[in-house]
Amino acid sequence: MTRSEISRGSLRSRDRNPAFQEQWHAQVVAIVELLLASGKLDAEDWSQTLGAELEKRARAGEADDDATHYGAFKATLERVLDRTGIAPHSEVDRRESEWRRAYLTTPHGKPVALSG
């Protein structure tokens, strides 16, 4: 089975319902898939870091559900991107602030423009 076949199959759970409760949950997984496929992230590092994050959440009593997995994927992605220098926390925070200012000052119905 190829990576794309695995990815397509994993979009649905065994009962054929969507595997993700929210679109952005799938988007985080897709970003990770692209970064792994392009070699920008190391698969072993990703796997170990994600496993540690999921274990931490399990010990804290979090449910084994989509929301927990999304939170773990997001936290792990942020940690790995910061550690590798691909997207340091300071840069992410700066861009988030720029985005917030842009959408708060954009007139209703107009597209949000983010410079840079």
Image: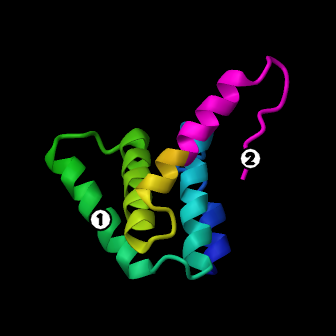
Instruction: Report the residue at 30% width, 72% height from top.
Output: 48
Residue 24: x, y in percent?
58, 43
- Does 3 appear above or below 65? below
Q: Position of residue 25 (x, y in %)?
A: 54, 45
Where does label 2 land, which residue? 115
Q: Is residue 57 above or below residue 81?
A: above
Q: Which amino acid, by three-letter code, is at mark 2? A: Ser
Q: Secondary structure at mark 2?
A: loop
For the view shown, which residue lies furthest in the top direction? Answer: 108
Q: Is residue 49 magenta?
A: no
Q: Position of residue 31 (x, y in %)?
A: 59, 61
Residue 20 seen in the figure: no
Q: Is residue 116 left or right of residue 11?
A: right
Quarter location, residue 7: bottom right
Q: Tell me which segment is drawn in magenta.
A: 95-116
Kindly state the secondary structure of the residue where label 1 is placed.
Answer: helix
Residue at (45% x, 71% y) in the render: 85
What kind of residue is marked 1? Gly
How far separated are the C-alphas under marks 1 and 2?
36 Å
Residue identified by numbered label 1? 51
| Left or right side of 31 for 83 | left
Q: Nearer the viewer, residue 105 or 46?
A: 105
Marks 1 and 2, the one that precedes in the sequence: 1
- Tell me if I can see residue 93 in this picture: yes
